[in-house]
Image (cartoon, helix red, strand yellow):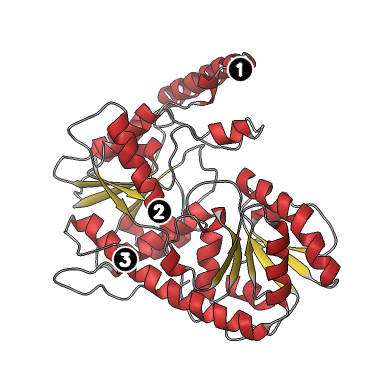
Protein backbone atom coordinates (compact mmCIF):
# COMPACT_ATOMS: atom_id res chain seq x y z
CA UNK A 1 0.00 0.00 0.00
CA UNK A 2 3.05 2.27 0.32
CA UNK A 3 4.44 3.68 -2.94
CA UNK A 4 8.21 4.12 -3.06
CA UNK A 5 8.14 7.15 -5.36
CA UNK A 6 8.09 9.72 -3.94
CA UNK A 7 10.00 8.37 -0.92
CA UNK A 8 9.02 11.10 1.53
CA UNK A 9 8.72 9.07 4.74
CA UNK A 10 10.62 6.40 6.62
CA UNK A 11 8.39 3.51 5.60
CA UNK A 12 8.59 4.35 1.89
CA UNK A 13 12.38 4.77 2.12
CA UNK A 14 12.64 1.33 3.75
CA UNK A 15 10.63 -0.34 1.01
CA UNK A 16 12.60 1.45 -1.72
CA UNK A 17 15.90 0.30 -0.27
CA UNK A 18 14.49 -3.21 0.20
CA UNK A 19 13.56 -3.28 -3.50
CA UNK A 20 17.04 -2.11 -4.47
CA UNK A 21 18.60 -4.82 -2.33
CA UNK A 22 16.39 -7.57 -3.81
CA UNK A 23 17.37 -6.47 -7.31
CA UNK A 24 21.04 -6.28 -6.28
CA UNK A 25 20.81 -9.92 -5.21
CA UNK A 26 19.86 -10.81 -8.78
CA UNK A 27 16.13 -11.38 -8.41
CA UNK A 28 13.43 -10.34 -10.89
CA UNK A 29 11.12 -8.09 -8.89
CA UNK A 30 7.44 -7.21 -9.36
CA UNK A 31 5.82 -4.47 -7.25
CA UNK A 32 2.07 -4.75 -6.61
CA UNK A 33 0.41 -1.63 -5.24
CA UNK A 34 -2.95 -1.30 -3.50
CA UNK A 35 -4.53 2.07 -2.73
CA UNK A 36 -5.37 1.86 0.98
CA UNK A 37 -6.68 4.67 3.18
CA UNK A 38 -4.05 3.64 5.73
CA UNK A 39 -1.43 5.23 3.48
CA UNK A 40 -2.49 8.41 1.71
CA UNK A 41 0.66 8.85 -0.39
CA UNK A 42 -0.18 8.97 -4.09
CA UNK A 43 2.28 7.06 -6.25
CA UNK A 44 4.40 8.64 -8.96
CA UNK A 45 3.41 6.11 -11.61
CA UNK A 46 6.06 7.12 -14.15
CA UNK A 47 8.90 6.69 -11.62
CA UNK A 48 7.61 3.26 -10.58
CA UNK A 49 7.40 2.09 -14.19
CA UNK A 50 10.91 3.42 -14.90
CA UNK A 51 12.30 1.56 -11.86
CA UNK A 52 10.47 -1.77 -12.17
CA UNK A 53 9.50 -1.88 -15.84
CA UNK A 54 5.95 -1.65 -17.17
CA UNK A 55 5.29 -5.37 -16.79
CA UNK A 56 6.54 -5.43 -13.21
CA UNK A 57 4.54 -2.56 -11.70
CA UNK A 58 0.95 -3.64 -11.07
CA UNK A 59 -1.97 -1.93 -9.37
CA UNK A 60 -4.96 -3.68 -7.80
CA UNK A 61 -8.30 -1.90 -8.11
CA UNK A 62 -10.96 -1.80 -5.40
CA UNK A 63 -13.50 -3.90 -7.23
CA UNK A 64 -17.01 -3.16 -8.53
CA UNK A 65 -19.17 -0.39 -7.14
CA UNK A 66 -21.21 -2.74 -4.95
CA UNK A 67 -18.07 -4.10 -3.26
CA UNK A 68 -16.73 -0.58 -2.68
CA UNK A 69 -20.01 0.53 -1.09
CA UNK A 70 -20.12 -2.51 1.22
CA UNK A 71 -16.53 -1.85 2.32
CA UNK A 72 -17.34 1.81 3.01
CA UNK A 73 -20.48 0.96 4.98
CA UNK A 74 -18.69 -1.59 7.18
CA UNK A 75 -15.99 0.96 7.93
CA UNK A 76 -18.51 3.66 8.82
CA UNK A 77 -20.36 1.35 11.23
CA UNK A 78 -17.07 0.26 12.86
CA UNK A 79 -15.97 3.85 13.40
CA UNK A 80 -19.30 4.78 14.95
CA UNK A 81 -19.25 1.78 17.29
CA UNK A 82 -15.68 2.55 18.38
CA UNK A 83 -16.62 6.15 19.05
CA UNK A 84 -19.37 4.93 21.38
CA UNK A 85 -16.96 2.58 23.17
CA UNK A 86 -14.34 5.34 23.46
CA UNK A 87 -16.94 7.56 25.11
CA UNK A 88 -17.19 4.97 27.89
CA UNK A 89 -13.40 4.72 28.15
CA UNK A 90 -13.38 1.15 26.81
CA UNK A 91 -9.89 -0.08 25.87
CA UNK A 92 -11.28 -2.21 23.02
CA UNK A 93 -12.21 0.97 21.11
CA UNK A 94 -8.56 1.42 20.13
CA UNK A 95 -8.13 -1.94 18.37
CA UNK A 96 -8.43 -2.57 14.64
CA UNK A 97 -9.35 -5.93 13.22
CA UNK A 98 -6.44 -7.69 11.52
CA UNK A 99 -8.08 -7.80 8.07
CA UNK A 100 -10.57 -4.96 8.31
CA UNK A 101 -8.75 -2.78 5.77
CA UNK A 102 -8.11 -5.59 3.31
CA UNK A 103 -10.52 -5.70 0.38
CA UNK A 104 -11.77 -9.01 -1.00
CA UNK A 105 -11.36 -7.89 -4.65
CA UNK A 106 -7.61 -7.62 -4.04
CA UNK A 107 -7.41 -11.31 -3.09
CA UNK A 108 -9.42 -12.28 -6.17
CA UNK A 109 -7.07 -10.30 -8.44
CA UNK A 110 -3.96 -11.81 -6.87
CA UNK A 111 -5.31 -15.35 -7.35
CA UNK A 112 -6.21 -14.58 -10.95
CA UNK A 113 -2.73 -13.38 -11.92
CA UNK A 114 -1.23 -15.21 -14.88
CA UNK A 115 2.27 -15.42 -13.40
CA UNK A 116 3.93 -17.35 -10.59
CA UNK A 117 6.51 -16.17 -8.07
CA UNK A 118 9.18 -18.03 -6.09
CA UNK A 119 8.79 -15.63 -3.15
CA UNK A 120 6.26 -13.02 -2.11
CA UNK A 121 6.94 -10.24 0.42
CA UNK A 122 4.00 -8.46 2.07
CA UNK A 123 4.41 -5.18 3.94
CA UNK A 124 2.75 -4.92 7.41
CA UNK A 125 0.93 -7.57 9.45
CA UNK A 126 -2.46 -6.00 8.73
CA UNK A 127 -1.93 -6.71 5.00
CA UNK A 128 -0.94 -10.34 5.66
CA UNK A 129 -4.16 -11.68 4.16
CA UNK A 130 -2.48 -11.15 0.79
CA UNK A 131 -0.26 -14.13 1.58
CA UNK A 132 -3.27 -16.46 1.48
CA UNK A 133 -3.76 -15.64 -2.20
CA UNK A 134 -0.53 -17.40 -3.16
CA UNK A 135 0.02 -21.18 -3.37
CA UNK A 136 1.83 -23.15 -0.69
CA UNK A 137 4.77 -23.63 -3.08
CA UNK A 138 5.52 -19.88 -2.86
CA UNK A 139 7.85 -18.80 -0.07
CA UNK A 140 5.92 -16.22 1.96
CA UNK A 141 7.60 -13.38 3.86
CA UNK A 142 6.02 -10.72 6.07
CA UNK A 143 7.96 -7.48 6.50
CA UNK A 144 6.50 -6.18 9.77
CA UNK A 145 8.01 -2.64 9.98
CA UNK A 146 6.73 -2.49 13.57
CA UNK A 147 5.04 -4.44 16.33
CA UNK A 148 1.35 -3.50 16.33
CA UNK A 149 0.06 -5.51 19.28
CA UNK A 150 -1.34 -3.13 21.95
CA UNK A 151 0.34 -0.29 20.08
CA UNK A 152 -2.11 2.31 21.42
CA UNK A 153 -1.35 1.78 25.10
CA UNK A 154 1.84 3.88 25.49
CA UNK A 155 0.15 6.69 23.55
CA UNK A 156 -3.01 6.59 25.67
CA UNK A 157 -0.86 6.53 28.81
CA UNK A 158 0.67 9.83 27.67
CA UNK A 159 -2.79 11.33 27.13
CA UNK A 160 -2.96 10.83 23.34
CA UNK A 161 -6.02 9.00 22.02
CA UNK A 162 -4.80 9.17 18.42
CA UNK A 163 -1.49 9.06 16.60
CA UNK A 164 -0.69 5.36 17.06
CA UNK A 165 -2.05 4.56 13.56
CA UNK A 166 -3.03 0.88 13.99
CA UNK A 167 -3.29 -1.24 17.13
CA UNK A 168 -3.97 -4.99 17.04
CA UNK A 169 -4.65 -7.51 19.76
CA UNK A 170 -1.71 -9.88 20.30
CA UNK A 171 -3.90 -12.76 19.09
CA UNK A 172 -4.69 -10.95 15.82
CA UNK A 173 -1.07 -10.02 15.23
CA UNK A 174 -0.08 -13.65 15.81
CA UNK A 175 -2.61 -14.75 13.21
CA UNK A 176 -1.01 -12.40 10.71
CA UNK A 177 2.50 -13.59 11.55
CA UNK A 178 1.55 -17.24 11.15
CA UNK A 179 0.41 -16.67 7.58
CA UNK A 180 4.10 -16.30 6.66
CA UNK A 181 6.94 -18.79 6.37
CA UNK A 182 9.30 -16.14 7.71
CA UNK A 183 8.64 -12.90 9.58
CA UNK A 184 11.04 -9.97 9.13
CA UNK A 185 11.60 -7.75 12.16
CA UNK A 186 13.59 -4.54 11.81
CA UNK A 187 15.50 -4.96 15.06
CA UNK A 188 16.52 -7.76 17.42
CA UNK A 189 14.30 -6.57 20.28
CA UNK A 190 11.20 -6.78 18.11
CA UNK A 191 12.22 -10.20 16.81
CA UNK A 192 12.41 -11.46 20.39
CA UNK A 193 9.07 -9.78 21.14
CA UNK A 194 7.44 -11.68 18.26
CA UNK A 195 8.91 -15.00 19.45
CA UNK A 196 7.64 -14.46 22.98
CA UNK A 197 4.22 -13.33 21.79
CA UNK A 198 3.81 -16.34 19.51
CA UNK A 199 4.69 -18.62 22.40
CA UNK A 200 2.37 -16.86 24.85
CA UNK A 201 -0.87 -16.49 22.90
CA UNK A 202 -2.65 -19.34 21.10
CA UNK A 203 0.33 -21.68 21.00
CA UNK A 204 0.63 -23.32 17.59
CA UNK A 205 2.76 -26.07 16.13
CA UNK A 206 3.36 -23.89 13.09
CA UNK A 207 5.25 -20.76 13.98
CA UNK A 208 7.17 -18.82 11.32
CA UNK A 209 10.89 -18.27 11.32
CA UNK A 210 11.72 -14.86 12.82
CA UNK A 211 14.55 -12.99 11.09
CA UNK A 212 16.05 -9.53 11.50
CA UNK A 213 16.47 -7.44 8.36
CA UNK A 214 16.70 -3.81 9.31
CA UNK A 215 16.56 -0.69 7.18
CA UNK A 216 19.15 -0.18 4.48
CA UNK A 217 21.23 2.95 4.13
CA UNK A 218 21.61 4.83 0.88
CA UNK A 219 25.39 5.12 0.54
CA UNK A 220 27.42 7.41 -1.67
CA UNK A 221 30.52 8.98 -0.12
CA UNK A 222 30.97 10.50 3.35
CA UNK A 223 30.44 14.23 3.57
CA UNK A 224 33.78 15.79 2.52
CA UNK A 225 33.40 19.13 4.32
CA UNK A 226 32.36 19.55 7.95
CA UNK A 227 33.35 23.19 8.05
CA UNK A 228 29.96 24.74 8.90
CA UNK A 229 29.92 25.44 12.64
CA UNK A 230 27.05 26.29 15.01
CA UNK A 231 24.39 24.26 13.17
CA UNK A 232 22.59 20.92 13.51
CA UNK A 233 19.92 19.07 11.53
CA UNK A 234 16.79 17.29 12.74
CA UNK A 235 15.14 15.07 10.14
CA UNK A 236 11.65 13.68 10.67
CA UNK A 237 8.11 13.14 9.48
CA UNK A 238 5.07 14.76 11.07
CA UNK A 239 4.32 11.82 13.37
CA UNK A 240 3.10 12.15 16.94
CA UNK A 241 6.22 10.47 18.33
CA UNK A 242 8.40 13.01 16.51
CA UNK A 243 6.24 15.88 17.74
CA UNK A 244 6.60 14.70 21.34
CA UNK A 245 10.37 14.33 21.00
CA UNK A 246 11.01 17.60 19.17
CA UNK A 247 8.80 19.57 21.57
CA UNK A 248 10.93 18.43 24.50
CA UNK A 249 14.09 19.34 22.60
CA UNK A 250 12.85 22.83 21.73
CA UNK A 251 11.71 23.51 25.29
CA UNK A 252 14.63 22.10 27.26
CA UNK A 253 17.73 21.58 25.08
CA UNK A 254 17.74 24.35 22.48
CA UNK A 255 17.64 27.21 25.05
CA UNK A 256 20.72 25.80 26.78
CA UNK A 257 22.59 25.65 23.46
CA UNK A 258 21.57 29.17 22.42
CA UNK A 259 22.64 30.61 25.76
CA UNK A 260 26.18 29.42 24.94
CA UNK A 261 26.07 29.90 21.13
CA UNK A 262 23.63 32.76 20.31
CA UNK A 263 23.92 32.25 16.53
CA UNK A 264 23.28 28.50 16.66
CA UNK A 265 20.85 27.22 13.99
CA UNK A 266 18.66 24.14 14.31
CA UNK A 267 17.53 23.18 10.82
CA UNK A 268 14.46 20.96 10.41
CA UNK A 269 13.90 18.78 7.34
CA UNK A 270 10.88 16.68 6.42
CA UNK A 271 7.16 17.01 7.04
CA UNK A 272 7.81 17.73 10.75
CA UNK A 273 8.21 21.33 9.49
CA UNK A 274 4.43 21.44 9.01
CA UNK A 275 4.00 21.07 12.78
CA UNK A 276 7.05 22.85 14.23
CA UNK A 277 6.49 26.32 15.71
CA UNK A 278 8.13 29.42 14.30
CA UNK A 279 10.74 30.33 16.92
CA UNK A 280 14.18 31.97 16.87
CA UNK A 281 17.20 29.84 15.98
CA UNK A 282 15.03 27.30 14.10
CA UNK A 283 15.02 27.12 10.30
CA UNK A 284 12.50 24.95 8.42
CA UNK A 285 13.81 23.37 5.21
CA UNK A 286 10.67 21.37 4.43
CA UNK A 287 11.00 18.26 2.28
CA UNK A 288 14.52 18.08 0.83
CA UNK A 289 15.32 16.21 -2.37
CA UNK A 290 19.05 16.16 -1.59
CA UNK A 291 19.70 15.09 1.99
CA UNK A 292 23.47 15.40 1.55
CA UNK A 293 23.05 19.08 0.72
CA UNK A 294 21.07 19.55 3.94
CA UNK A 295 23.79 17.81 5.95
CA UNK A 296 26.46 19.94 4.23
CA UNK A 297 24.74 23.02 5.69
CA UNK A 298 24.41 21.33 9.09
CA UNK A 299 27.09 18.64 9.51
CA UNK A 300 25.74 17.47 12.86
CA UNK A 301 22.61 15.37 13.37
CA UNK A 302 20.41 15.44 16.49
CA UNK A 303 18.07 12.58 17.35
CA UNK A 304 16.20 13.48 20.58
CA UNK A 305 13.69 10.62 20.25
CA UNK A 306 11.85 9.72 23.46
CA UNK A 307 8.81 7.96 21.96
CA UNK A 308 8.03 5.44 19.23
CA UNK A 309 9.11 1.99 18.12
CA UNK A 310 11.28 0.49 15.43
CA UNK A 311 14.65 1.84 14.41
CA UNK A 312 15.23 5.52 13.61
CA UNK A 313 15.82 6.02 9.90
CA UNK A 314 17.03 9.56 10.61
CA UNK A 315 19.90 7.97 12.51
CA UNK A 316 20.79 5.68 9.59
CA UNK A 317 20.54 8.57 7.11
CA UNK A 318 23.15 10.51 9.07
CA UNK A 319 25.43 7.47 9.19
CA UNK A 320 25.11 7.05 5.43
CA UNK A 321 26.12 10.68 4.90
CA UNK A 322 29.12 10.35 7.21
CA UNK A 323 27.68 12.76 9.78
CA UNK A 324 27.90 12.26 13.57
CA UNK A 325 24.71 12.09 15.63
CA UNK A 326 23.85 13.04 19.20
CA UNK A 327 21.01 10.77 20.31
CA UNK A 328 18.94 9.69 23.25
CA UNK A 329 19.01 6.06 24.38
CA UNK A 330 15.56 5.51 22.85
CA UNK A 331 16.81 7.01 19.61
CA UNK A 332 19.45 4.29 19.13
CA UNK A 333 17.14 1.35 19.89
CA UNK A 334 17.83 -1.60 17.65
CA UNK A 335 21.18 -0.32 16.37
CA UNK A 336 23.51 -2.43 18.49
CA UNK A 337 26.68 -1.35 20.24
CA UNK A 338 28.97 -2.37 17.38
CA UNK A 339 27.46 0.33 15.15
CA UNK A 340 27.62 3.35 17.48
CA UNK A 341 31.16 4.53 16.72
CA UNK A 342 29.90 7.77 15.19
CA UNK A 343 27.35 8.52 17.91
CA UNK A 344 27.18 10.26 21.26
CA UNK A 345 24.36 8.84 23.37
CA UNK A 346 22.68 10.43 26.41
CA UNK A 347 19.83 9.40 28.69
CA UNK A 348 16.36 10.22 27.36
CA UNK A 349 15.69 13.22 29.60
CA UNK A 350 19.24 14.41 30.29
CA UNK A 351 18.80 17.81 28.65
CA UNK A 352 22.02 19.25 30.03
CA UNK A 353 24.18 16.43 28.64
CA UNK A 354 22.47 16.64 25.25
CA UNK A 355 23.08 20.39 25.09
CA UNK A 356 26.72 20.03 26.21
CA UNK A 357 27.43 17.56 23.39
CA UNK A 358 25.83 19.87 20.82
CA UNK A 359 27.86 22.83 22.04
CA UNK A 360 31.11 20.84 21.90
CA UNK A 361 30.56 19.25 18.48
CA UNK A 362 29.08 22.30 16.79
CA UNK A 363 32.33 24.16 17.56
CA UNK A 364 34.75 21.39 16.51
CA UNK A 365 34.85 20.52 12.79
CA UNK A 366 37.72 18.06 13.29
CA UNK A 367 35.78 16.05 15.85
CA UNK A 368 32.69 16.07 13.63
CA UNK A 369 34.72 14.73 10.72
CA UNK A 370 36.40 11.92 12.68
CA UNK A 371 33.10 10.78 14.18
CA UNK A 372 31.43 11.10 10.77
CA UNK A 373 33.99 8.83 9.12
CA UNK A 374 33.42 6.26 11.88
CA UNK A 375 29.66 6.51 11.29
CA UNK A 376 30.12 5.93 7.55
CA UNK A 377 32.29 2.85 8.15
CA UNK A 378 29.56 1.51 10.45
CA UNK A 379 26.99 2.17 7.71
CA UNK A 380 28.97 0.06 5.23
CA UNK A 381 29.18 -2.88 7.66
CA UNK A 382 25.51 -2.41 8.55
CA UNK A 383 24.42 -2.74 4.91
CA UNK A 384 26.52 -5.85 4.41
CA UNK A 385 24.80 -7.52 7.35
CA UNK A 386 21.30 -6.58 6.20
CA UNK A 387 21.95 -7.80 2.65
CA UNK A 388 23.14 -11.19 3.91
CA UNK A 389 20.11 -11.53 6.20
CA UNK A 390 17.75 -10.59 3.36
CA UNK A 391 19.26 -13.21 1.05
CA UNK A 392 18.73 -15.80 3.78
CA UNK A 393 15.05 -14.81 4.07
CA UNK A 394 14.42 -14.90 0.33
CA UNK A 395 16.05 -18.29 -0.17
CA UNK A 396 15.56 -19.93 3.21
CA UNK A 397 19.27 -20.86 3.31
CA UNK A 398 21.14 -21.40 6.56
CA UNK A 399 23.51 -18.70 7.71
CA UNK A 400 26.70 -18.90 9.69
CA UNK A 401 27.13 -17.13 13.04
CA UNK A 402 25.15 -13.85 13.23
CA UNK A 403 25.94 -13.03 16.86
CA UNK A 404 26.69 -9.39 17.72
CA UNK A 405 30.05 -8.37 16.35
CA UNK A 406 29.92 -10.84 13.45
CA UNK A 407 28.71 -10.12 9.93
CA UNK A 408 26.48 -12.85 8.49
CA UNK A 409 27.99 -14.63 5.50
CA UNK A 410 26.75 -17.20 3.04
CA UNK A 411 28.30 -20.61 3.46
CA UNK A 412 28.92 -20.97 -0.26
CA UNK A 413 29.17 -17.43 -1.57
CA UNK A 414 30.05 -13.84 -0.70
CA UNK A 415 27.31 -11.19 -0.84
CA UNK A 416 27.42 -8.72 -3.71
CA UNK A 417 28.05 -5.07 -2.82
CA UNK A 418 24.99 -3.08 -1.83
CA UNK A 419 23.89 -0.55 -4.47
CA UNK A 420 25.19 2.94 -3.83
CA UNK A 421 22.29 4.91 -5.34
CA UNK A 422 20.72 7.27 -2.81
Q: Residue at x 19, y 49 (%)?
A: 116
Helix or strand or loop: what does disc 2 sit on? loop
Counting from the top left corner in percent of width and height, residue 298 is at 68, 74
- Residue 187 disc label: 2
Q: Quadrant of the N terminus?
A: top left
Q: Nearer the viewer, residue 269 or 61?
A: 269
Residue 415 at what x, y percent from top left? Answer: 25, 72
Instruction: Left or right? Give the position of 342 relative to 281.
Output: left
Helix, strand or loop under label 1? loop
Q: Quadrant of residue 229?
A: bottom right
Image x and y of residue 208, in percent: 23, 42
Residue 89: which numbered mark, if any?
A: 1
- In this picture, is 106 found above or below 123? above
Distance of label 3 from label 1 (alpha carbons): 45 Å
- First in residue order: circle 2 vs circle 1: 1
Q: Is residue 240 positioned above or below 382 on the image? A: above
- Give how far across and how far down residue 398 sits, in percent: 16, 59
- Measured Cα–Cα span from mark 2 to mark 1: 33 Å
Task: Please name which of the two marks, 2 or 3, marks the residue nearer to the observer.
Answer: 2
Between disc 2 and disc 3, whose residue precedes?
2
Q: Which residue is mark 3?
A: 387
Whichever of callouts 3 and 1 sits on the residue coming sooner in the sequence is 1
From the viewer's perspective, is residue 409 above or below residue 129? Answer: below
390 left or right, relative to 167: left
Identity of the residue drawn at 56% across and 37% down: 164
Amino acid sequence: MTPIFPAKAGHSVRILQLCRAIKALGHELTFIHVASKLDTQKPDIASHVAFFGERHFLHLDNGPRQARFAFWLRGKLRRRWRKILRGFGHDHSHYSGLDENWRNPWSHQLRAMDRRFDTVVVEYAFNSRALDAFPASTRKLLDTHDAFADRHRPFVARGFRKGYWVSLTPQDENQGLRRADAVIAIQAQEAEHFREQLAQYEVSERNPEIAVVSHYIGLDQPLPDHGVDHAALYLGTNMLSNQISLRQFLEHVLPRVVSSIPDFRLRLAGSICNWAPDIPNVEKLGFVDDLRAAFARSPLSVNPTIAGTGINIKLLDAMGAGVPTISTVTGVRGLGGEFNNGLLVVADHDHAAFADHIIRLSKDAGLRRSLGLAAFADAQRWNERQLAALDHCLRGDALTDTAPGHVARWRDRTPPPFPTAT
